[in-house]
Amino acid sequence: MSSTNKARVVVLISGSGSNLQALIDGVADKSLPIDLVAVISNRPEVMGLERAVKANIPAEVLDHKTFADRERFDQALMAMIDSYHPDLVVLAGFMRILTPEFTQHYLGKMFNIHPSLLPKFQGLHTHQRAIDAGEKRHGVTVHFVTAELDGGPAIVQASVPVFTSDDASSLAKRVQRQEHVIYPLAVKWFAQGDLHMIDGKSVLKGEPLPPSGFQIESDET
Ligand code: GAR
């Protein structure tokens, strides 16, 4: 941890940054004992960058379109991230497939949030796919990042009901409210030294978590 004794956290984004905002809010109200040391976006001019600037967090753009291939982009991204000496890297709507070198470099020190109850619905369009599959419940998972896309050990999962009146947008909103609860929670556990990835499993306060992670059920409409 850093000299202030708080975990140094770098957040990677590609878009609106509402999950970044949840972390910024947690720092502001002192519920989250971390230093947000940088926000890096692979897309210029996204709202998440404005959120970072407003919160006085260094905001950087590394545009993947200016790189010849995925390997070179990931190498440059690693160099940029490491210049901030993070204890934790948080992928918050960072819409890139990562090279094995990248995931290996941050193994046990990088989280992702994925809008489904993993292992269900890896990949894109998760809300529509949950509706189409007739799921009664849907949700979101925070997990450690490994080389397997959307496949690392789960840390925490929040589920919400799916209503027959739902479309992808109404369901996404219900899920996102839970995202903004569980991402700060997982980051807090890590920052407090309570959460580790050991032998490919998430371990919270010395106890291995179940394969789907710590479970939170919300019945909010
Ligand atoms: C979030 O809903 C997150 O779960 C999703 O992108 C959104 C980003 O929103 N992530 C993925 O789909 C990753 N596969 P935000 O920019 O407002 O935090």
Image: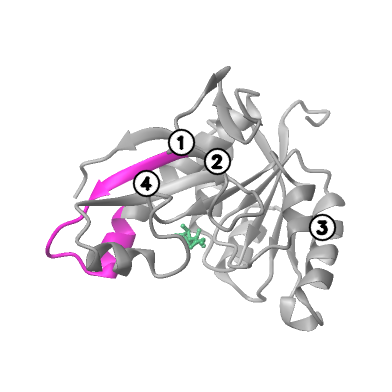
Question: Crowding at label 2, few (<14), some or many (≥20) Cα neighbours within 10 Å?
Answer: many
Q: Are marks 1 and 2 in contact (CB under 8 Å)?
A: yes
| CA distance separating discs 1 and 2 | 7 Å
Three-letter amino acid code of the residue under disc 2 = Pro
Region of the chain picked out in magenta, as a range = 156-174
| CA distance separating discs 4 and 2 | 19 Å
Q: Which residue is tagged 4?
A: 178
**Residue at 39% from the left image edge and 60% from the top image edge:** 121
Question: Crowding at label 1, few (<14), some or many (≥20) Cα neighbours within 10 Å?
Answer: some
State which tag comes first along the sequence, 1 or 3: 3
Disc number lying in front (4 or 1):
1
Q: Which residue is tagged 1?
A: 211
**Measured from the top left, where is residue 148 in percent x and y?**
61, 55
Q: Quadrant of residue 216?
A: top left
**Residue at 38% from the left image edge and 49% from the top image edge:** 117
State which tag comes first along the sequence, 4 or 2: 2
**Measured from the top left, where is residue 40 in percent x and y?**
71, 61
Disc number lying in front (2 or 3):
2
| CA distance separating discs 2 and 3 | 22 Å
